[in-house]
Image (cartoon, grey):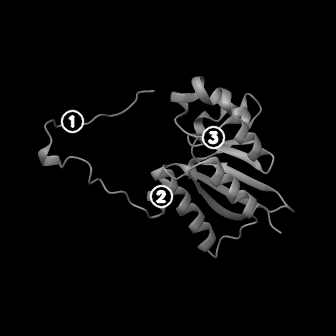
Amino acid sequence: MRPSIFLAVSLSSNYKKKVVEKIVDELKSNVSIKLEYNIDRIVYQSFNDISNFLKANLNSTSENIIIFVDIPNISLEEIYQIKSMAKIFQVFADIPEHYHSFFKYTQFLYKGIFIEEPEYKNFFDIYGLASYDGSLFCHETAKIIGETSSYESLIPFRKRLYDFSFVGRLD
């Protein structure tokens, strides 16, 4: 039996959930892509959802990999329970914002990490952790593959009080 890869995402992560759905659907439906792994998604609200899914779907005769596409809101004990069943990987984004306060320390919980901004890969390579380009998991992926987001929540241009926009962080 083939090994399995599970892309795990929280039910409350709207953008990442769309990305995971698009990636899994595209990989399963595209006949020109020959996969050496089974691929599926885990959309969870709690650790119990993850645990129940894994108990029902784990392949006991080969390797199982779980990639958390967003930061899981579960305890360390629960992460270790999952690690006993499968290899765990994590997707990190916004490296400049979170590296020194969070990612620098939590990276060691995982077998490896995917980095949405691959230019920061060397931040993790220095510690010897397996790190990979995670650009595929960027929230823009859903748009590239075909899922478009509407901007209905924005104020129409003609009704705005100011004629400029915020550029963003300068890091």
Locate residue 108, reporting x and y percent: 73, 32
Locate residue 107, reporting x and y percent: 69, 33
- N-terminal of the two: label 3 or label 2? 3
Residue corresponding to mark 3: 74
- Answer above or below: position of 26 versus 70: below
- Answer above or below: position of 19 versus 159: below
The kind of residue on which mark 2 rests is Ala
The kind of residue on which mark 1 rests is Phe
Residue at x 65%, y 51% (from the top left corner): 48
Residue at x 76%, y 44% (from the top left corner): 81
- Answer above or below: position of 63 versus 159: below
Tell me if 161 is positioned left or right of 82 in this view.
left
Residue at x 59%, y 23% (from the top left corner): 100
Q: Secondary structure at mark 1?
A: loop
Residue corresponding to mark 1: 164
Sort mark 1 into few (<14), some (14-19) or many (20+) by Cα contacts within 10 Å: few
Query: Of circles 3 and 2, which is in front?
Result: 3
Between the residue at mark 3 and the residue at mark 1, the CA separation in whole angstroms equals 41 Å
Residue corresponding to mark 2: 142
Tell me if 67 is positioned left or right of 143 in this view.
right
